[in-house]
Image: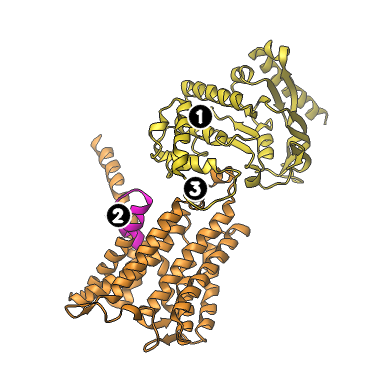
Amino acid sequence: MLEIKNVSVIFNKDTINERRALDNVSLVLNDGDFVSVIGSNGAGKSTLLNAIAGNVTVDSGKIYNNGYDMTYEKEHKRSKYIGRLFQDPLKGTAPSMTIEENLGLAYSRGKKMRMGFGVRKSDRPFFKKECEKLGLGLEHRLKAPVGLLSGGQRQALTLLMATIETPELLLLDEHTAALDPKTSKQIMEITDKIVKENNITTLMITHNIKNALRYGNKTLVMSNGKIIKILEGESRKNMSIQDILDLYSQNADSLSDSAILG
Amino acid sequence: MNFTTVMGGIELGCIFAILSLGLYIAFRILNLPDLTVDGSFVTGLAISSAFTLLGQPFLGLIFAIIGGALTGVFTGLLHTKLNMHAILAGILTMTGLYSINLHIMEDKPSLYLGGLPNIFDGLRNKVIINGYDYGMLIQLLIINTIIILALYLFLKTQIGMSLRATGDNEEMVRSSSVNTDLMKIMGFGICNGIVALSGCIYGQYTQTATVGVGTGMLVLGLANIIVGETLFKTRGIFNHLICIFLGAIVYRLILTYAFQLGLPTSDIKLFSAAVVILAIFIPSIKPRYEKWRKKNARD
């Protein structure tokens, strides 16, 4: 269970450019929740994910994972139980290393460093089986450098790497946005399958409102560093894209009002 | 060019191959050129000379490696913990090391080690064919083989893989729960440990230790790597290591030949710098020429 309590992140604090990227945000994710996050640019979606992953330090508030306070834990320590995907497919893999070496590295996540080879003979059948699940033919190219793969293949591999050692939390930051529509759909379906199979608590940012409503069991709508609406169950099912767009614009109005009234 | 000169060139090439194999870790694996080597080469040389003067050249070899590794760790700490640029961190360590190296050498700018016990004594005058003593070369080849195999196996281990990935895609490595700072510090440590070993062997080979000999070692090491990579284009870590070894020998033979043709020894650094610049410049000519050709073809 992930608990976020009154978290604020302020950029350029005490300057004229001060901006509250996260404004007193509280949120609880239950085990197995697959939550999509939507909102216009600058709404604080990415900051929320970065605060959870640890590459943004929060200014106030606490973040708990299964009751454990991880607010100030270092990024590489958190990544023992957090899997992460970025928008840029090049970010998640080491290009000059082979597919099996990348998987070997990911497979060691959270475990103690051991001596001996990074890719053991006994690991190969397992890696092969995992790659087969993606249905992209990567299982035949385990010894090929990752730099030779296409963006979609690299993102699929990153997804596999993030989940090969089942994480307690999976953070997806617009992970299909840089791919063509067909590949994007393919990756979304693989994501959904992996998340459901392993019952991974997932937070997914997307600009694709259709996907946001279609996948997962909850949807957060963010604006100006706040969560303005949590959709789930019936109300989520009956939401249309237009309803969401209306939500965005309503909120934009309320901001300008408050800005004028000071 | 007579036979003895060529053999001397190959032997020196083997010594500087060790330097380049160390530098490979920083320059190619971590993608960070490490200027510490100009200092750590002399640190290895100085420590080993000081021990040789005490009659313990092998102990000197071990402490040279340790001393060199420590200089690298220091640069790594400056780079990661103080967020300093890797080049500045290297320059600072290298500059400070100049004084430390002098102190290790009992504040004398040069030491003569002739007639003292030497790490090459084991095979000296044992393998003589046609009047040339191959003992030195054999020992140098053994050392190089050990280093190449050790580096190759190390880079295939889990720690070695994390090190490679750190140079390749740091962000990804951090999200695989690896401490990238530690990896960089370790990389710098290994690099300079090997460089110091090369300095130690250079001192044992020439039987002298001079405090100023380190200047330009980074460029020399880069020249070896780049010559090797340009001549023997290849993929894979093992082949890459072999390339560097061969590159160092080829480069040293080119230098030897240039000396024979009358290049003054004082121009060696200029020559090395020019080789590095040329090796980087030449591959960029072709695409530029292609672009120029296409542009003019349209009219």
- Residue type (three-letter) at the residue carrying disc 2: Thr
Q: Quadrant of the N terminus of chain B?
A: bottom left
Q: What residue is pinned by disc 2?
A: B230
By secondary structure, the bulk of the magenta-drawn segment is best described as helix
Q: Colour of chain B?
A: orange
Residue A31: image location, x then y, percent: 70, 28
What's the chain of the residue with tag 1?
A
Residue B70: image location, x then y, percent: 55, 68
- Residue type (three-letter) at the residue carrying disc 1: Ala
Residue at the spot x=30%, y=44% of the render? Answer: B287
Residue B235: image location, x then y, percent: 34, 48
Q: Name the side, left or right, on which A170 lies relative to B38.
A: right
Magenta part of the chain: B224-244
**Relative to B176, residue B136 above or below:** below
Q: What residue is pinned by disc 3?
A: B165
**Relative to A247, residue B235 above or below:** below
- Residue B35 appears in the figure: no
**Relative to A80, residue A202 above or below:** above
